Image (cartoon, rainbow, N blue to C red):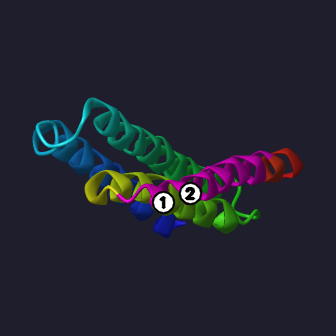
Amino acid sequence: MKVWWIAGALMAGLAVAAGAFGAHALKARLSTDLLQVFETGVRYQMYHALGLLAVAMASDRWPQLSFNLVGWLMLAGIILFSGSLYALCLTGIRALGAITPLGGVCFLAGWAVMAWKIGRG
């Protein structure tokens, strides 16, 4: 599906931009610990942007299977996991860290659903 090619490419590009922002604009403003948290958000965003591209490839390879749930889970994971880490670093509101595991669950569920669909397909 074209939407997952586009979403993957956009999320990858945004991960590159966030990484550059962290390395240049935030390096002098954040503690080393918070900078590492920000970089974790960037890294997982890129991993799952590539995952969205894998969803697009799987959709092309197995058009009879719907990988939409996988794509939505990965996109939700990026927003919840990486987004909460970015927000925590930029605002200092530690409570935002409570959202991060929900994104991790979305990531895990997305990969599990993808494996299940391909295994059954």
Q: CA distance from mark 1 to mark 2?
A: 6 Å
Residue placed under numbered mark 1 in the picture = 95
Q: Position of residue 20 (x, y in %)?
A: 18, 42
Q: What is the chief secondary structure element of the magenta stretch?
A: helix
In the displayed structure, would residue 73 be above or below residue 82?
A: below
Total number of numbered labels?
2
The residue lying toward the viewer, choosing from 57 and 30, is 30
Within 10 Å of the Cα at label 1, are there few (<14), some (14-19), or many (20+) other Cα atoms? few
Residue occupying image coordinates x 35% and y 59%: 87
Q: Secondary structure at mark 1?
A: helix
Image location (x, y in percent) of residue 16: 26, 45
Can residue 5 be seen here? The reply is: no
Q: Position of residue 30 (x, y in %)?
A: 21, 41
Q: Specify start and end residues of the magenta stretch as a single range.
A: 93-115
Task: Give the class, few, some or many, for how many residues have Cα within 10 Å of label 2's Cα (few <14, many ≥20).
Answer: some
Left or right of residue 101, residue 26 in this image: left
* Residue 116 appears in the figure: yes
- The answer to whether residue 78 is magenta is no
Instruction: Tell me, for residue 3, which label it has, or none.
Output: none
Residue bearing the label numbered 2: 98
Question: In the current view of this chain or complex, which residue is farthest to the right?
Answer: 120
| Tag 2: amino acid | Ala
Q: Residue at x 72, y 66 (%)?
A: 66
Question: Amino acid type of disc 1?
Answer: Ala
Write down the quadrant of residue 72 in the picture.
bottom right
Q: Are marks 1 and 2 in contact (CB under 8 Å)?
A: yes
Name the secondary structure under disc 2. helix
Residue 32 vertical placement versus 78 (above, below): above
Residue 70, percent from left and from top: 66, 59
